[in-house]
């Protein structure tokens, strides 16, 4: 997982309240600040710290303060049919466009059975699973994906042409937890490399390459180089498909056309594209029949024969749900260098960080 391995524990609600205040201090509307904060805190709770306040808060604040990302939300529907919609986000905070798109997608799927939406000229939207999981309370299957600034080379190359390009699928169950698959098309997210570099920790072998395309465990060399795709050429192919659908189809940036990474580019808007989908189970079978079948399938997988040395078999999302429960009880770990950043940010904006 893209989580930190240790740090000072802070109660989630204290971090939530402080983050909401910080975002409002830089001009974000209160209601938008609540949504943006929730997306980040949920990422931290689920152990996806690269998309939580641990990694993204200071980046979002700096981009807003430097005028690279708009604090004000402006969302316009530019194309719409019965089961599709395209929303121009006008450089609004990515979570705002994602929320509107997923809401409309779910509403449309309730009538048409399946719906697909996209946003253009947007920004980093946080944890992909956060949006896919919004379909679960309606008993639907949810999907979300986005493209990102280039950090991966095509197989056989050493020029970065594709981002981490994550996607998430959330499938409802009955007695069992929902099945939630959330992954980047790189072995790790670039934010995890950043977190390791901030702590001067070596990377795991197979995570990244230097700028010559040579495998490296040096996080600083990796930041100047490339991320490794999942599954070799297969990961490259998936990243390409996501980039074309999220970027080219929406009229947003794609490939090497991004102006730079979020934390490094404080001059130009990122202009990402994202897509969302919802499948109304009722269009194919009775919802209760479906969720009962998912329960049976999950039990079959979990109870199947284990490899030698394996203690248990996990279902996608199961570790994240367990991490969420643990962090709600014990607190969210924030590494000391990040705590120092938060203290400085809070002092500068007049919102002291909770100690």
Image (cartoon, helix red, strand yellow):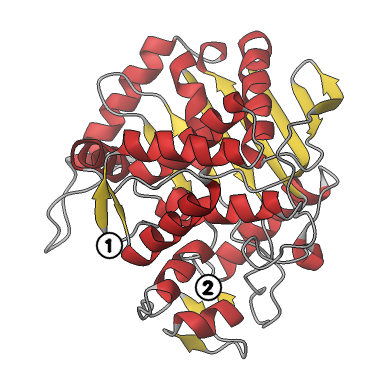
Q: Is residue 190 left or right of residue 108?
A: left
Residue at image mark 1: 5
Query: Of residues 171 and 152, which is closer to you in this image?
Result: 152
Q: Residue at 43% across / 12% down in the picture? A: 287
Q: Residue at 33% across / 37% down in the picture? A: 14
Give the number of marks: 2
Where residue 190 sits in the image (x, y, percent)?
A: 53, 65
Residue 228 shows which numbered tag? Answer: 2
Image: 249 above or below 306: above
Where residue 206 sits in the image (x, y, percent)?
A: 42, 77
Mark 1 neighbour class, 10 Å CA radius: few under 14, some 14 to 19, many 20 or more: few
Q: Residue at 58% across / 56% down in the picture? A: 59
Image: 67 above or below 46: below
Q: Is residue 101 left or right of residue 203?
A: right
Q: Quadrant of residue 96?
A: top right
Q: Secondary structure at mark 2?
A: loop
Q: Secondary structure at mark 1?
A: loop
How far apart marks 1 and 2 lie (CA) works out to 21 Å
- Of the residues under marks 1 and 2, which one precedes in the sequence? 1
Where residue 78 sits in the image (x, y, percent)?
A: 88, 28
| Foreground disc of the pair 1, 2 | 1
Q: In this rendering, does residue 316 appear at all? A: no
Q: Residue at 78% across / 54% down in the picture? A: 269
């Amino acid at each position: 997982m893209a989580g930190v391995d240790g740090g000072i524990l802070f109660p989630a609600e204290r971090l939530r309240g402080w983050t909401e205040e910080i975002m409002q201090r830089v001009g974000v509307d209160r209601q938008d600040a609540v949504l943006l904060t929730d997306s980040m805190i949920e990422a931290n709770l689920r152990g996806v710290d690269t998309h939580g306040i641990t990694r993204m808060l200071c980046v979002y604040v700096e981009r807003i303060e430097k005028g690279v990302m708009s604090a004000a939300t402006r969302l316009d529907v530019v194309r719409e049919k019965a089961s599709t919609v395209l929303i121009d986000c006008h450089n609004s905070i990515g979570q705002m466009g994602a929320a509107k798109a997923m809401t409309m997608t779910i509403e449309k799927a309730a009538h048409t059975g399946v719906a697909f939406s996209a946003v253009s000229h947007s920004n980093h939207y946080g944890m992909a699973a956060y949006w896919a999981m919004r379909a679960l309370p309606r008993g639907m299957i949810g999907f979300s994906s986005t493209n990102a600034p280039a950090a991966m080379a095509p197989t056989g190359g050493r020029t970065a042409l594709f981002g981490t390009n994550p996607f998430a699928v959330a499938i409802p169950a009955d007695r069992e937890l929902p099945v939630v698959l959330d992954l980047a098309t790189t072995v790790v997210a670039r934010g995890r490399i950043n977190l390791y570099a901030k702590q001067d920790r070596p990377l795991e072998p197979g995570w990244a390459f230097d700028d010559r395309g040579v495998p490296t465990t040096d996080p600083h060399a990796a930041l100047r180089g490339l991320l490794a795709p999942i599954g070799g050429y297969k990961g490259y192919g998936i990243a390409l498909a996501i980039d074309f659908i999220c970027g080219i189809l929406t009229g947003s940036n794609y490939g090497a056309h991004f102006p730079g990474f979020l934390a490094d580019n404080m001059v130009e808007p990122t202009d990402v594209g994202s897509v969302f989908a919802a499948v109304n189970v009722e269009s194919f079978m009775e919802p209760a029949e479906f969720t009962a079948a998912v329960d049976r399938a999950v039990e079959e997988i979990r109870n199947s024969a284990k490899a030698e040395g394996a203690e248990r078999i996990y279902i996608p999302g199961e570790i994240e749900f367990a991490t969420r429960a643990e962090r709600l009880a014990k607190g969210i770990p924030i590494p000391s260098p990040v705590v120092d950043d938060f203290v400085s940010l809070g002092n500068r904006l007049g919102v002291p960080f909770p100690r």
